[in-house]
Amino acid sequence: PVQTASRSYLARAVPEGHEGEIFGLYATTGRAAGWLANLLYFAFITWLMHPKAGVWGILVVFALGLALVITVPAKPKVIDLTRTTGA
């Protein structure tokens, strides 16, 4: 559900004509950032020498995500249905 909602939001936020570029960047950053939580999880465990310390690494990733999401404008995109249906 979250991934579907983020794609839906991205589709509304992307400037017309840049859809392929932005969705390609979306897919690439998703794959590139996938290892970040694991890396920080094990880094905190190693640094603090306690298995429960890994939660701090995950919290860092959530905080970074929240900081990025807060900066995103929430303006809706108006779609002209007459142009897309051929009417």
Image: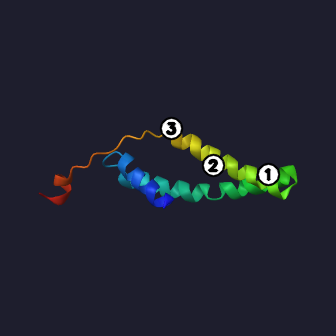
Q: Which of marks 2 and 1 is in front?
A: 2
Earlier sequence position, callout 2 versus callout 1:
1
Q: Residues within 10 Å of mark 2 (few under 14, many from 20)?
A: few
Look at the image and name its color scheme. rainbow
Q: Is mark 3 on a helix, strand or loop?
A: loop
Q: How far apart are marks 2 and 3 (CA)?
A: 15 Å
Q: Check the image and name the residue furthest to the right.
A: 49
Query: Of residues 51 and 22, which is closer to you in this image?
Result: 51
Crowd tier of the residue under label 3, counting other residues whose Cα lies within 10 Å: few below 14, some 14–19, many 20 or above: few
Pinpoint residue 8: horizontal percent, then vertical percent.
40, 55
Mark 2 element type: helix
**Does residue 21 appear in the picture of this structure?**
no
Name the residue carrying label 1. Answer: 44
Amino acid under disc 3? Thr
Separation of residues labelled 1 and 3 (CA atoms): 27 Å
Which structural element holds mark 1? helix
Q: Name the residue under label 3.
A: 71
Residue at the (70%, 58%) spot, across then down: 38
Which numbered disc flags the more N-terminal residue, 2 or 3? 2
**The residue under label 1 is which amino acid type?**
Phe
Q: Is residue 76 above or below residue 87?
A: above
- Which residue is the site of mark 2? 62
